[in-house]
Amino acid sequence: MVRAAADGAQITVSHDAIPGFMDAMVMPFTVRKPAALPAISPGERIRFRLVVTGSGSYIEGIQVLSPARTDAGLLRSPMAPVLTPIGANVPDFSLVEASGKRLALSDLRGQVVLITFIYTRCPLPDFCPLQMAHFKEVKARLHDLIGREVTLLTITFDPRYDTPEVMRGYGAAYGADGHGWSLLTGTAEEIQKVTETFGLEFWPEEGLITHTLQTAVIDREGRLYATLEGKGYSIDQLVDVTSQALRARP
């Protein structure tokens, strides 16, 4: 176990591969019954049952198998987030679109920009696929504004695997065609710069990445207007915040 949320509702685990379902990776899991979560500490080996339904996933039956080791290097500490304050200018960045072309945040000045983060190999329907589904719905609801006044950016956490070609195929399944909704990748250093900008926690673990979930809304002047953390926000909330940003005065 890498870390646990203060309320016990989520724990981040470096887990073994599940044959035929998902690779070994570091990722957060929702705990079905936080009140029943045993006392666990970072570095302890645990066992649990992963339940995946048509609309979500959770873990249960958590057991501690062995205590944390104390030798150096077992766990890497998350990088300290460098969160851009609400109302502050978002530092410019440039990443690669699925088409292979470069896109900079500054290219979108004058539009409201929504940014979220995914990796295409994520198998849990209530994590990265949910972020994609949210943006698909936003695109449908704000169809007349997409590409003119609102742009959606989805950035991968797995740039070694998520090449522009992979991102193009993944985005096509959700209706992301580069016209108002772009999927972006880049070098590990470029991705790190962007995640630090938005205060996300992430760190490499044997070539994989663990991360928090966050969606950012940037106003027409390039300032951070709002952030929606985790996966609990609704489409109505996201559309409402976007609409407020569109109406906001410079």
Image (spheres, rainbow, N blue to C red):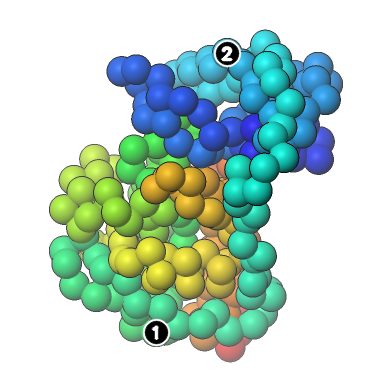
With respect to residue 240, does 17 lie above or below?
above
172 horizontally vs 14: left or right: left
Residue at the outermost bottom position: 250
**Which one is nearer the viewer's eye here, 94 or 201?**
201
Answer above or below: position of 77 versus 36: below
Q: Is residue 206 left or right of residue 235?
A: left
The reply to whether residue 214 is visible in this rendering is: no
Image quarter (top left, top right, bottom left or bottom right) of the N terminus = top right
- Neighbour class for label 2 at 10 Å: few (<14), some, many (≥20)? few
Q: Give the x, y percent position of residue 10.
A: 68, 34
Residue 49's disc number: 2
Quadrant of residue 57 in the image? top right
Asked whether, in this view, residue 206 is left or right of residue 213, the answer is left
Tell me which amino acid carries mark 1. Answer: Ser
Q: Quadrant of the C terminus?
A: bottom right
Identity of the amino acid at label 2? Arg
Q: Nearer the viewer, residue 188 or 107?
A: 188
Find out whether the residues at labels 1 and 2 contact each other: C-beta distance under 8 Å. Answer: no
Q: Which residue is mark 1?
A: 106
Q: Residue at x 39, y 84 (%)?
A: 106
Q: Residue at x 61, y 43 (%)?
A: 74
Up the image or down, 84 lies above or below 56; here it is below
Q: Which residue corresponds to the image point at 64% horizontal and 72% vertical from the top-left? A: 82
Q: Point out residue 172 in the picture as x, y percentages from the top left corner.
A: 21, 46
Instruction: Check disc 2 and report its element: helix, strand or loop.
Output: strand
Residue 165 point in image, percent of width and height: 16, 53
Q: In this view of the protein, which residue sits in the foreground, 12 or 204?
A: 204
Q: Residue at x 31, y 66 (%)?
A: 186
Q: Quadrant of residue 6?
A: top right
Q: CA distance from mark 1 to mark 2?
A: 45 Å
- Expressed as whole percent of the image width and height from the top left, the position of residue 187 reads 33, 67
